[in-house]
Amino acid sequence: MASRAHPPEQAEGNTFPKLLLDNARRRPERPAMRLKDLGIWRTWTWGEMKDEVMRFALGLEALGVKEGDTVAIIGGNRPRLYWTFLAAQSLRAIPVPVYADAIAEELAFVLDHADVSFAVCQDQEQVDKCLSEQERLPKLRTLVYDEPRGLRDYDPTHLHSFDAVQALGDDKIAADTGTPARWETLIAAATGEEASTILYTSGTTGQSKGVVLKAARAVQAARDTAGFDHLNERDEVLAYLPLAWVGDHYLNYAQGLVAGFCMACPESPETVQQDLREIGPTFYFAPPRVFESLLTRVLIRMEDASALKRGMFRHFMGVAKRHGEAILAGRRVPLTGRIAYAIGERLVYGPLKNVLGFSRIRVAYTAGEAIGPDLFSFFRSLGINLKQLYGQTEAFLYITAQADGTVRADTVGGALPGVTLKLAENGEVLFKSPGMFVEYFKAADKTAETLTEDGFIRTGDAGIFEPDGQLKIIDRAKDVGRLKNGALFAPKYLENKLKFFPEIREAVTYGDGREFVTAMLNIDLIAVGNWAERNNIGYASYQELAQHPRVAEIMRAHVAATNAALAEDAQMSGMQIRRFLVLHKELDADDGELTRTQKVRRSFVADRYAPLIEALYGGQHECFISTEVTFEDGRKGLIQATVAIHDAVVAPSQPARKAA
């Protein structure tokens, strides 16, 4: 602990391949990466990882990869895919990661737009998606795969295994023993002004844009935040976030190379929770929906526990609510409170953190959308140092973050080192940062729209500064509107309040320019399914459960509670929900309703479910709708349902305070 008083030793260099070489020199025997395969964790040291990257880079060079080429990386969290980033960057090629769950059409858009000529795929599924779009991808000439299962009989003309590419690298080294030195010299000669990667945005507000990042800027941004949280070589993370998302690229890849810590890759998306328990990370990030899901699971398990365990859990969670956050922040707490909390740590908090895989966490973050205050306080009261940050792909993630001792549920922290923040006249947050992007790839007009005349980036988010300098995000600037009577309408704020309830997985609200506010809800199948099982309610599908009358009553109660909370705030009381419905299907990224980072595409949903919205405002009590869905194998189908529409309980509004 004492060592944290001093800045952690960071790798030197202004490009990621330079950081790799420096880590291999400084800490060759320290673990750099782990992978759980067939139930067994395999570890690579920094020295071993450097050799793996070099062999693959030289193999890519033998296949024709050169400076300026774009190399697609398609798949999940796998060491070889992370090594591909470094291998491409060492040759001054530009890696372009693609979401593993992107359908073939989405994948083809990115590969075509980015002029991709080489693609490194995780497995047969990703190879098949590339091959199915060959006509749209005339520039794509070479595919490389990591996992060989199912690919034995494929035409090998332009298809190579990862091992075969590394073998080409070995051949180059055998033919000329000076090849490794030449490779390192090429890395050392990089200025840092080269494009480091192109990250495509999630497409919340339209078509995805390719965000071009410079190497030196990206490294500096990672260096600033690694220092901010004292990350060092003894930290460990679990890399389970989407490989193509800026969060994974920054939090795991960039900060790992800067700080020299170990990045562990789970066996599969389905085993993340078990792998998290086995690794016990010290640094952790999850969007609010992950913490919502974890809390839902905890509460469901407690409902099934014995009366003694339920009673003990409720008692000590009450103790944690009173004293946990104060103890974590180092504030004064009565001796009786500390003793009670210590007993709770032994009996409840410690075992619970162990089950969740949070026993060793010293720094944890959440971001992406607002987190409910009670949800935030729940995890902090357990002794987990959960904080909030605010960032964007265009900033290479961090813009603000909460420093220890200044953590609050309603803000996202102050500006980080090197970041300049200000608000436009309309309240939009503007920033400059060390990692700010260069441009949108092949979209000069969009770049110009995003940058102000004095070089600030428009975030599209509306915010305010608190007296202590922390930033509070209200909503997307373009989404904040008014009802016909002039009352404020902030849809994201409202949706986050609804999603605090474990039975509500997603919510979409409408009201701008309308007489009143309405909501479309998705149930959480795990939480509501558990409730149905305990109440002997049978159901055959999500659709059947979602439209059950007793489920509607649960939703009505949650909407009423949300309205009651809104009524206590004079500014927000006017946007209480008057009518709502429970959607007959889950919102899905494959259907275009969510982005690949699970954010609602509000305008798309409004168009897709226009008949339901009109029924909500037209006074109808049910509406028939037929919705096209996309199955995992790409096939299309229809889901038809008669959706019930409900009136909500509206609370009396508090009188508005007179302006000073």
Image (spheres, rainbow, N blue to C red):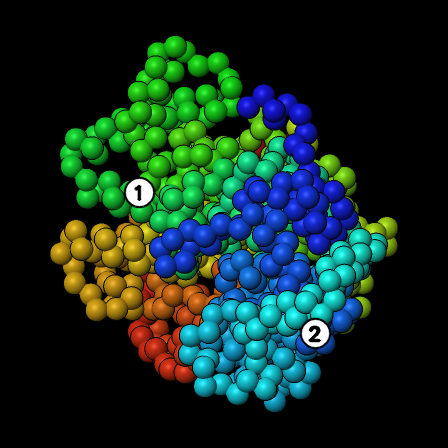
Quarter of the image where one finds residue 317: top left
C-alpha distance separating marks 2 and 1: 52 Å
For image coordinates 31% across by 25% down, the residue present is 346
Whether residue 260 is situated above or below residue 627 in the rendered picture: above
Which residue type does callout 1 highlight? Answer: Val
Q: Is residue 70 visible?
A: no
Image quarter of the N terminus: top right
Q: Which circle marks residue 616 in the picture?
A: none
- Residue at the image position 65 percent from the left and 32 percent from the top: 8
| Residue under pointer 1 | 298
Element at label 2: helix
Please identify, in this view, whether the residue under mark 2 or under mark 1 is nearer the observer: 2
Residue wearing tag 2: 62
Q: Are marks 2 and 1 in contact (CB under 8 Å)?
A: no
Name the residue located 57 percent from the left edge and 81 percent from the top edge: 159
Q: In the shown orientation, is residue 242 left or right of residue 313? A: right
Relative side of 535 to 493, left or right? left
Q: Is residue 106 above or below residue 398?
A: below
Residue 612: x and y, percent? 41, 70
Q: Amino acid at mark 2?
A: Ala
From what the image shows, is residue 112 above or below residue 579? below
Q: Position of residue 347 (x, y in %)?
A: 28, 27
**Residue 530 in the image, given as x and y percentages of width and height:** 23, 53
385 in relation to 484, above or below = above
Q: Nearer the viewer, residue 487 or 443?
A: 443
Mark 2 residue crowding within 10 angstroms, few (<14) / some (14–19) / many (20+): some
Question: Which quarter of the image is occupied by the C terminus?
Answer: top right
